[in-house]
Structure formats: C-alpha cells, structure tokens
Amino acid sequence: MAGTVNRVILVGRLGKDPEIKYTPSGTPMATFSLATDESRKDASGNRQQITEWHNVVLWGKQAEIAGEYLRKGKLIYMEGRLQTRSWDDAQSNEKRYRTEIIGDRFTMLSSRAEQGESQDSAKASAPQPTQPAPEGKLEDEEDLPF
C-alpha cells in the first residue's frame, strides 16, 4: 500500500481558554475548542455563516505555551493530525467517539490591538507574511503565515 497522510491545517478562533492538565508522569496537556467559519449561500440565495468546532489537544511545551498565551477569541494558525479515540460511557453503556486535532504547532495571529497594544499602533503596522512558527515558538503579528 502507498504511503498515507494525516495532516490538518486550521486558522480559527479559540472557543474557550485552554484547559491545562498533567499526566501522572508530569507531562502537560492543553485542550480547547477552535472555531472555523465558512460563508455559504442557502437554497434561497441568502448568505449563511457556518461555524465548525474542532477539539484541539496539545502536549508538552506546546501545552505550556498555550496555557500561558492563548485565550478565548484569539485567532491562531494550527497544524496537527486527526485522531479519534473511543471509550465506553459508564452512564449509558454506549461506545462513545471523539475526533481531535493533535496539534504539532501553532502560531498566534491575533492583532496587536487584541494583544493589548493601543489601537493607534495596531493601525500603523500592517501584517507581514511569513511561515508558521516552529514547534514551541510564538510569533507576533508581523509573522503571519499569509
């Protein structure tokens, strides 16, 4: 069989602040939801905004950085892979499934104004294109991936 690819790239806004937990061995894990939007025309020709919610999991240094810097509403670029896990629900005795994005790296894309700088300085500087941050590194507005 030929090689396969499991790669996800998302640009979206956090639906909640990251929740940080630690494994028994002390490895940090961050979880949060990420919203992506798409605009479509319905059958009547009216534009509708469709929001898709993604469950994100980060591990190690990425989880620590997310816990320190990411907040609800922040725009981020995320790379990772899809993973589906299953478990038996103790209350309903049914098998449950959850598909998650296991994040490899992320880059904050929020504007300087959203990061707490004055509106004037945010208007004075336009975003400059760049590549996504390497794992464990955050970049500012001037380092947007597009």
Image (cartoon, rainbow, N blue to C red):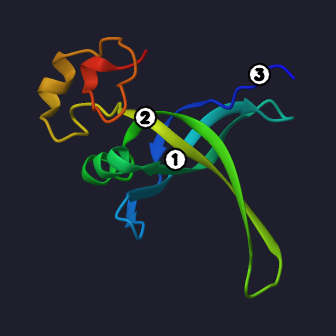
- Alpha carbon distance from label 2 to label 3: 23 Å
Name the N-terminal-most of marks 3 and 1.
Answer: 3
Q: Are marks 3 and 1 in contact (CB under 8 Å)?
A: no
The numbered dot on residue 105 is 2
Residue carrying label 3: 3
Q: Amino acid at mark 3?
A: Gly
Q: Nearer the viewer, residue 52 or 56?
A: 56
Looking at the rendering, which quadrant does residue 138 occupy? Answer: top left
Say which of 2 and 73 sits in front.
2
Image point (53%, 49%), residue name: 56
> Mark 1, residues whose alpha carbon is within 10 Å: few (<14), some, or many (≥20)?
many
Mark 3–mark 1 Cα distance, whole angstroms, equals: 29 Å
Viewer-nearest of labels 2 and 1?
2
Quarter location, residue 123? top left
In the displayed structure image, the side of residue 142 where residue 41 appears, left or right: right
Mark 1 sits on what residue? 34
Looking at the rendered image, the quarter that the N terminus falls into is top right
**Disc 2 vs disc 3: which is toward the camera?**
3
